[in-house]
Image: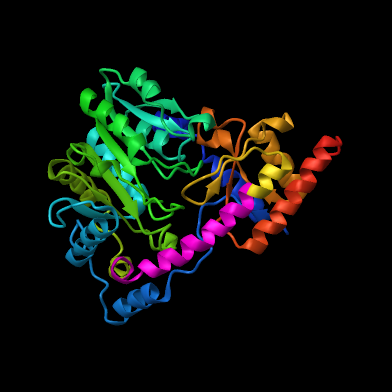
Amino acid sequence: MDYNKFLASEAQAIPPSGIRKFFDIAGKMEGCISLGVGEPDFKTPWMIRDAGIKSLERGKTWYTSNAGLPEVRREVSNYLARRFGLQYDPESEITITMGGSEAIDLALRAVIDPGKGQEVIIPEPAYVSYAPLCRLCGGVPVPLPLRPENGFRPDPEDLKVRISPKTKMLILAFPGNPTGAVLRYEHLLPIAELVKQADILVLTDEIYAELTYGRQRHVSIASLPGMKERTIYINGFSKAYAMTGWRLGYVCAPHPLLEVMVKIHQYAIICAPTTSQYAAIVALRDCDESIEAMRTEYDMRRKLLVNALNKMGLTCFDPEGAFYVFPSIRSTGLTSQQFCEKLLYSKKVAVVPGDAFGAAGEGFVRISYSYSIAHLSEALSRIEEFLKELKQGKA
């Protein structure tokens, strides 16, 4: 039977995730060290797990409202005001989703009109989901290359020339995956001015907002003058609270935008997992100290990796956020794919090729430091051996 005639051409054309390719190989390789997947190695803090367990014990297993439990939305509102100075109405401007990933999908589906060639500007290297989800909605992804000499931040002039009459939205994802780059107030200001002049929307994915290093706190573009009304803000619990498997996120937006997103959410999902929502109340209200403890540990790992990779000759941009480093491997003469394949099969270390995050990522690899110091140290030792063997023509 020919199933091709039944399958949607756009869905068929989407390539599988470049992250998962190497993760799947590593999972079948005995003794392999995988630094590929961005998942915290910490357990979800006990008080969060306990809240989920108690909700089950009390039989709280029914559907919630489509937008989520009112208590969760109130806590999200309080958390955003306390941590980032953002003001969102829990009744009309916040919806709880199945992770940040569903929130991204909802935002794109609510905004893009299929068949009209509407464009979405995506700074790259970028998280692997943005461009495919844009295409599935009938949109046209427009890459905005990011350069290490600019700290992997969008250049306002580069952005300006990519804005066209068909531009509908700009996606910002900072702290960035895979680069670890951050945008401070002074970087956001010219971007915000261009967005307002062009009369377009911003989707800001701030899932790593709590994982910034140094004295300066994370700044959201939604907090800038005139930007809340044209910003779709996305965040979640996976990274800051080590809650990847709980599948919980949220989207905040002006009511007319959110109202349409909730309708899509209503028909596709109904509501986010009830147990996870009860756990999230405790996370938002009582777990600031857990965030700080995890961030301190990540910072130690970040410094270890950056210093070690630079000493090996793999020039490494100093990331200020998230839990990834994005070293250049151009000095080896290998492509990103070649480097990762040779490293995997010769030293059993899995990292992700930079071109998995867009063409601008070629010549780099992504290494996650959401792993223990012991795990990272062994991997670094193997990478150093691999580089020495490359120079000797043995790898």
Query: Where is residue 310, by image quadrant?
Result: top right
Relative depth, front residue between 58 and 122: 122
* Count of numbered labels shown in the rendering: 0
Provide the major secondary structure of the magenta segment.
helix
- Residue displayed at 30% across by 45% down: 220
In the rendering, at what x and y percent does residue 166 appear? 27, 20
Whether residue 256 is visible: yes
Q: Is residue 364 left or right of residue 167?
A: right
Q: Is residue 134 above or below residue 157?
A: below
- Residue displayed at 43% across by 72% down: 45
Query: Where is residue 231, by image quadrant?
Result: top left
> What residue range appears in magenta?
282-306
Q: Is residue 225 left or right of residue 136?
A: left
| Residue 153 is a magenta residue | no
Relative depth, front residue between 21 and 174: 174
In the rendering, at what x and y percent does residue 253 appear? 20, 45
Q: Quadrant of the C terminus?
A: top right
Farthest-out residue, front: 215
Q: Is residue 356 left or right of residue 112?
A: right
Whether residue 6 is visible: no
In the rendering, at what x and y percent does residue 244 appear? 43, 59
Relative depth, front residue between 101 and 84: 84
Q: Is residue 223 above or below residue 272?
A: above
In the rendering, at what x and y percent does residue 363 appear? 62, 31
Q: How is the image coloured?
A: rainbow
- Residue displayed at 39% across by 50% down: 216
